Image: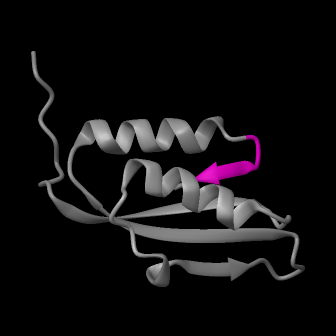
């Protein structure tokens, strides 16, 4: 039985990555994102700092090409020790 996707590929797909504000966080996340979405444009990265400056939120809108691509990207991000939450 094949699972139907509610997403039509290719499409713009935002991924929000949250973690503690620390040196190397943004660059590490960009490296993972670009591994799975090589055409991601760094200039479109949205960065927000929490009220107290403790956490960073990165929003990367990628050109998603398949469910498999999104699954492997989410798995790689989730496995990284700097990541606190993904949306």
Q: Is residue 52 above or below residue 32?
A: below
Q: Is residue 69 left or right of residue 41?
A: left
63 horizontally vs 3: left or right: right
Quarter location, residue 12: bottom left
Residue 75, horizontal then vertical, whole percent: 51, 35
Position of residue 28 measured from the top left corner of the image (x, y, whole percent): 67, 56
Q: Is residue 83 magenta?
A: yes
Query: What residue is shown at x 48% (from left), y 43% (from top)?
Result: 74
User: Where the N terminus falls, by quadrant?
Assistant: top left
Residue at 15% from the left image edge and 28% from the top image edge: 3
Residue at image position (41%, 36%) is 72
- Compared to residue 10, the image places residue 47 above or below, namely below
* Count of picture labels: 0
The residue depicted at 78 percent of the width and 62 percent of the height is 24
Direction from residue 82 to residue 87 in the image, left or right: left
Quadrant hosting residue 53: bottom right
| Occupied quadrant, residue 58 | bottom right
Foreground of the two, 25 or 50 = 25
Could you tell me residue 78's position as x and y percent? 60, 40
Q: Main secondary structure of the magenta part?
A: strand
34 shown above or below 52: above
* Colour convention of the picture: one colour
Please report the bounds of the magenta region as a residue range: 81-86
Q: Is residue 79 magenta?
A: no
Determine whether, in the image, residue 75 is placed left or right of residue 69.
Answer: right
Q: Is residue 6 above or below residue 41?
A: above
């Amino acid at each position: 039985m094949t699972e139907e996707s509610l997403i039509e590929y290719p499409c713009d797909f935002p991924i929000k990555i949250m973690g503690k504000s620390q040196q190397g966080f943004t660059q590490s996340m960009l490296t993972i994102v670009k591994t799975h979405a090589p055409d991601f444009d760094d200039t479109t990265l949205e960065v927000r700092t929490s009220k107290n400056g403790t956490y960073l939120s990165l929003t990367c809108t990628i050109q998603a090409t398949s469910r498999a691509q999104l699954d492997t990207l989410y798995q790689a991000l989730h496995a990284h020790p700097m990541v606190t939450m993904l949306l």
